[in-house]
Amino acid sequence: MDLQTHSQFLLQQKLTLLINRYEYFLYDNDVKGELIAFAEQARFAFREAITVWKSDTKADVLFTVKAEKLLDVHGRFLVKDTDGNLIGYCKKAFGASLLRSTWEIYDAQDTLLFTARELSPVMAIVRRVAQFIPFLADIAPFFPFNFVFEKETAVVGAHTRVWGSFTDQYKQSLDAQLSGADRRLVLALGILLDALQDR
C-alpha cells in the first residue's frame, strides 16, 4: 500500500497496565478503514526504539522511532525505515512549548516540513495551571491534546480528538501542501504526541 496517496488517518490508543498499544487505520472521508500500522510501547519509558509494524501480526516493520539521546525529552526523535535509513525526525520546540506545546517535523535533509502546535492557547494555559490545583491536577492529563499543523503560517493539517468511543482516538488530516511529506513521519508524530504529552 502506498501511504502517500492518503491524507487522513485514525490513531487509536489502547491502555493496559504496562503497555501503550497504538493502532493506525486509514480514515479517508472520516470512515475507518484498513489497519496500516501497529505499535506497543512500555508506559513511562522511551529509551528503546519503538518498532511500528504494518499490522498486529508483527510480520513486517513499517518504521522505527528512537530518541537520539537518552534522557533528553526535548531532543530529536529519529524516524528510520526498515534498512535503518533516516526518514526524518520530530523535535519538541522547548521554548515555544513552555506556553503552548509545539513540535517541529523535519525530513532527512533537515528541511522543516511543518510545525505541530497545540490548537488552543487557552486550553494550553488551563492545562498548565490545573497541574497545581488539587483534583484538577488528577484529570488535567486526560484533557485532549488537539494540534494544528502549520507551514509558513498557513494551516496545512491537524491532529484532533475523535469523540464517541471509550478508546483514545485521534484523527490526523493533511492538506495538499503536505503531499510530499512522508506519511511515516506523520504517523510517528501521533505516537510521540500521545507518549510524551503526559497522557
Image (cartoon, rainbow, N blue to C red):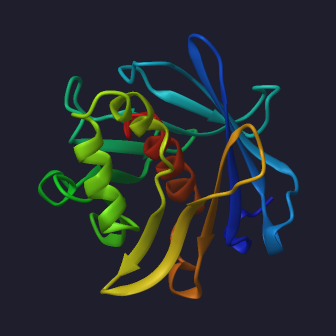
State the count of labels: 0
Residue 105 visible in rendering: no
The percent coordinates of residue 41 (x first, y second) are: 54, 23
Is residue 77 shown left or right of residue 129?
right
Is residue 77 shown left or right of residue 71?
right
> Could you tell me which residue is drawn at 51 percent across and 29 percent down?
50
Q: Nearer the viewer, residue 174 or 83?
A: 174
The percent coordinates of residue 25 (x first, y second) are: 77, 51
> Could you tell me which residue is drawn at 21 percent across and 41 percent down?
74
> Could you tell me which residue is drawn at 30 percent across and 67 percent down?
121
The percent coordinates of residue 63 (x first, y second) are: 57, 41
Q: Does residue 144 sit above or below 75 in this rendering?
A: below
Q: Identify the image quadrant of residue 39.
A: top right
Is residue 151 shown left or right of residue 40?
left
Most distant residue in the left direction: 95
Residue 86 visible in rendering: yes
> Could you tell me which residue is drawn at 58 percent across and 80 percent down?
179
Q: Does residue 80 sit above or below 95 in this rendering?
A: above
Is residue 70 shown left or right of residue 27?
left
Most distant residue in the top direction: 18
Q: Does residue 179 sit above or below 4 in this rendering?
A: below
The percent coordinates of residue 191 (x first, y second) are: 52, 42
Q: Nearer the viewer, residue 67 or 170?
A: 170
Q: Quadrant of the N terminus?
A: bottom right
